[in-house]
Amino acid sequence: MRLFAISNIHGYYDEFMALLDYVQYDPCSDQLFILGGLVDYGPKSLEVVEECIRLQKEGATILRGQREQLYINAFACDHFPSEETLCKTKNTLVYFYHDHPSIKDRHIEFFRSLPFYTEYGDYVLSHAGMDINYKDNFAYCLGNRDFFLTPEEELKKTGKIYVFGYTPVFVLNPDHSHALFKKPHLIGIDFGAGRHPLGTLAIVELGQQKYYKIKVA
């Protein structure tokens, strides 16, 4: 079985589908992990959410990311600062959701159903890094800067490989390259789609640590 992971799709539906097609993803024989950051920035967030709902029904694992949490805060928790933050983002869904409450309710219910992290074999996957002691759920989708400072020997003790998005690879790589971020127990898979002029979207085959990128429009 091939294991694929993709993060921070951010509304780039066409590119997302092109990557799945390129690797010939088959839900009957492959396992797909989508690590949140589904919406905003790109032009087709609605299509991305609908496709993720469909993929989940076929067996894909979808995780909650920062964007999903902000929409939960704004609409399920009536948290105006979160809505204000979303309104500053290119191609936000806020205005569409206000005009289409039934779609909004269905999407927010979907976002709320998404787990913060998942484990599969030797892998632990999350949106934005981990609290390796499993104490702080929100660190998984809102960013845990201490995670990147965790000593390698502490990560090694867990026996796990941590896969995450949220922070672009060119921020993490010492040479600022747009290559997959890899350490013995860390794999960063966010290539900055929609948030950087040179950002791309990528899908990673975890077992081989191969990745396939596509430029976003």
Image: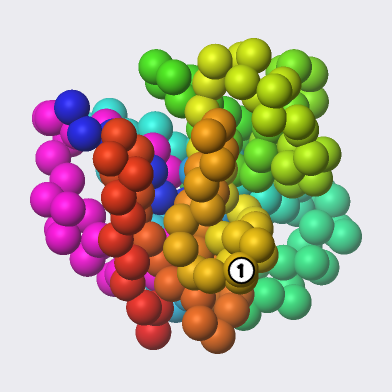
The x, y position of residue 196, in whole percent, is 59, 79
Can the viewer see residue 38 in this picture? no
Residue for badge 1: 175
Check the image and report above or below for 26 versus 214.
Answer: above
The x, y position of residue 76, in whole percent, is 71, 43
The x, y position of residue 122, in whole percent, is 44, 19
- The amino acid at mark 1 is Asp
Measuring 39% from the left and 32% from the top, which residue is drawn there? 61
The x, y position of residue 1, in whole percent, is 18, 27
Measuring 44% from the left and 38% from the top, which residue is drawn there? 62
Indicate the secondary structure of the residue bearing disc 1. loop
Instruction: Using the image as rendered, state which of residue 179 and residue 2 is in the foreground.
Output: 179
Q: Is residue 85 left or right of residue 52?
A: right
Instruction: Using the image as rendered, state which of residue 173 and residue 28 is in the foreground.
Output: 173
| Mark 1 Cα-neighbour bin, 10 Å: few <14, some 14–19, many ≥20 | few
Check the image and report above or below for 110 versus 151.
Answer: below
Say whether residue 12 is magenta: yes
Q: Quadrant of the C terminus?
A: bottom left
Measuring 39% from the left and 78% from the top, which residue is drawn there? 216
Q: Which residues fall within the magenta stretch?
A: 8-34
Instruction: Using the image as rendered, state which of residue 151 and residue 215 is in the foreground.
Output: 151
Say whether residue 40 is magenta: no
Can the viewer see residue 189 in this picture? yes
Q: Is residue 207 left or right of residue 81?
A: left
Instruction: Using the image as rendered, state which of residue 75 and residue 114 is in the foreground.
Output: 114
